[in-house]
Image: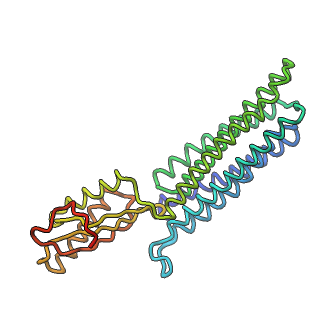
Amino acid sequence: MNENHKQSTFAIWLSFISNIVLTAIKLIVGLVFNSPVLVADGVHNAGDVVATGAALSSMRISKQPPDQDHPYGHGKAEVVGAGIVAIILGLAAVYMAYHSVMVLFDPPQETTVIALIAAAFSLIVKQLLYRYTMSIGKRLKSNGLIATAYDHLADVYASIAAVIGIGLALIGDHYQIAFLSYGDPVAGIVVAYFVLKLSIHMGRSSVDVLMEKTVDAQKLNELTRLVESVPEVKRIDRIRARDHGHYIIVDVRVGVPGHLSIQTGHDIARTIKQTIMEQHEDVGEVMVHLNPWYEGEGGPQASADR
């Protein structure tokens, strides 16, 4: 097991265990001390346990080597896992909004400092987990870890709402200001909106990868310049690149002098592949097709699909 795989596995297991512990704390404190917002946040965390489990399973699958049925590897398993996390976040947002609206129609309930401490503790832990998981996910280009990090971020938003809501309720109880007791459900509705927005963004990103959307224009331009830097390349007939989970696949067709030998053509193709992969660590595969080029047929920017 290489060092990168160890770090990603540790990060996802840390998230998984933390979610279980926080779920238990929130549900127990919420039920014992009569805090609806903590109960709702605990149910949200229970969904996180399922989401993190999905991310963990998808990451394990994505690390498997290519086989006869999956010659390009299993990288998209992480994308599927990220999509599952997005769905769970969306459902959690709907539940949070529904619960918050229902609380608005109930008489205000008294809360305790214990509930505030539990919410604040969750906020600190989730913020630390978000920063740690996101840093590892971006460095390793792991869609599963990045999705888990966004899941932690959604929990940060939810915990902020819980802290604000419980804090306002405590102030309202102390100073006999009844309407402050409803700060909790109002904050919950606002947070539900942001969690839903986050889930839509994650879901859209997952669909883009599964539908093999091309990489951004800047990335494609960088790849084009690298191919043009190979002296024997006289024309780029086509260049495409797509995200395949935790790596990118590049497909390029170029025109080279038609009189060159097969061996020379092979060497040119290998040079193109090495040039791209040395400059872009996130590129896992480069497929090169050579077309014959003759004097007067056009320069590197020709776009004919041959």
Percent from the top left, x then y, of residue 247? Answer: 43, 62
Residue furthest left in the image? 295
Estimate the x, y position of residue 64 in percent, counting from the top left. 52, 71
Q: Position of residue 1 (x, y in %)?
A: 50, 65
Residue 300 visible? The answer is yes
In which quadrant of the rendered view does residue 154 lie?
top right
Front position in the image: 8 or 268: 268
Left or right, 26 with respect to 12, comes to right
Task: Tell me the quarter of the image containing the C terminus.
Answer: bottom left
In this rendering, the answer to whether 288 lies above or below 149 is below
Residue at image position (25%, 64%) is 303
Q: Name, please, the residue furthest toward the top.
A: 175
Judge left or right: residue 194 versus residue 166.
left
Q: Nearer the viewer, residue 300 or 89?
A: 300
Residue occupying the point 64% across, 61% down: 54
What residue is shown at x 57% (from left), y 66% (from top)? Answer: 60
